[in-house]
């Protein structure tokens, strides 16, 4: 059995971490798709209308001076 260089071991570990993160991301994307599909089936729930930047800023402009 040959030993790999430290760089090879680190590269292998980074590949494993990347694979794990990719799998987690795929799971979250699937969950989001399911939530959107269920929200479309529920009566009375519609996605919020996109606001303009001015409307978004006006909603936060409530701090006392």
Image (cartoon, rainbow, N blue to C red):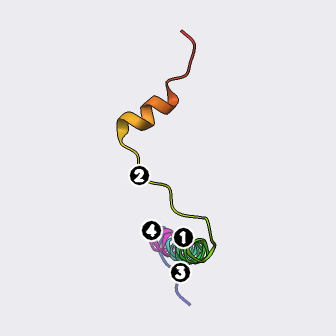
Q: In front: 8, or 12?
A: 12
Q: In front: 27, or 33?
A: 33
32 on left or right of 56? right
- For the record, the magenta segment spans 8-16
Distance from disc 2 to disc 1, alpha carbons, whole Å, reads 30 Å
Mark sitting earlier along the chain (1/3): 3
Mark sitting earlier along the chain (4/2): 4
Residue 64 magenta: no
Q: Secondary structure at mark 1?
A: helix
- Residue with the most extreme bottom position: 1
Distance from disc 2 to disc 3, alpha carbons, whole Å, reads 56 Å
Q: In front: 16, or 48?
A: 48
Residue at 44% over, 54% down: 49
Residue 35, above or below 51: below
Please report contact status of discs 4 and 2: CB closer than 8 Å, yes or no: no
Residue 11 magenta: yes
Q: Secondary structure at mark 3?
A: loop
Instruction: Please name which of the two marks, 1 or 3, marks the residue nearer to the observer.
Output: 1
User: Which residue, given by chain and number where applicable, does mark 1 sit on?
Assistant: 21
User: Which residue, given by chain and number where applicable, does mark 3 sit on?
Assistant: 3
Distance from disc 4 to disc 2, alpha carbons, whole Å, reads 48 Å
User: Which residue, given by chain and number where applicable, does mark 2 sit on?
Assistant: 50
7 on left or right of 63? left
The x and y percentages for residue 25 are 53, 71
The x and y percentages for residue 14 are 50, 69
């Amino acid at each position: 059995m040959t030993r790999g260089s430290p760089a090879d071991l680190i590269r292998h570990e980074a590949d494993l971490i990347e694979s794990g993160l990719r799998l987690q991301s795929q799971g979250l994307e699937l969950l989001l798709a399911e939530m959107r599909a269920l929200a479309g089936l529920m009566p009375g729930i519609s996605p919020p209308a996109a606001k303009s930047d001015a409307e978004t800023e006006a909603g936060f402009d409530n701090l006392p001076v």
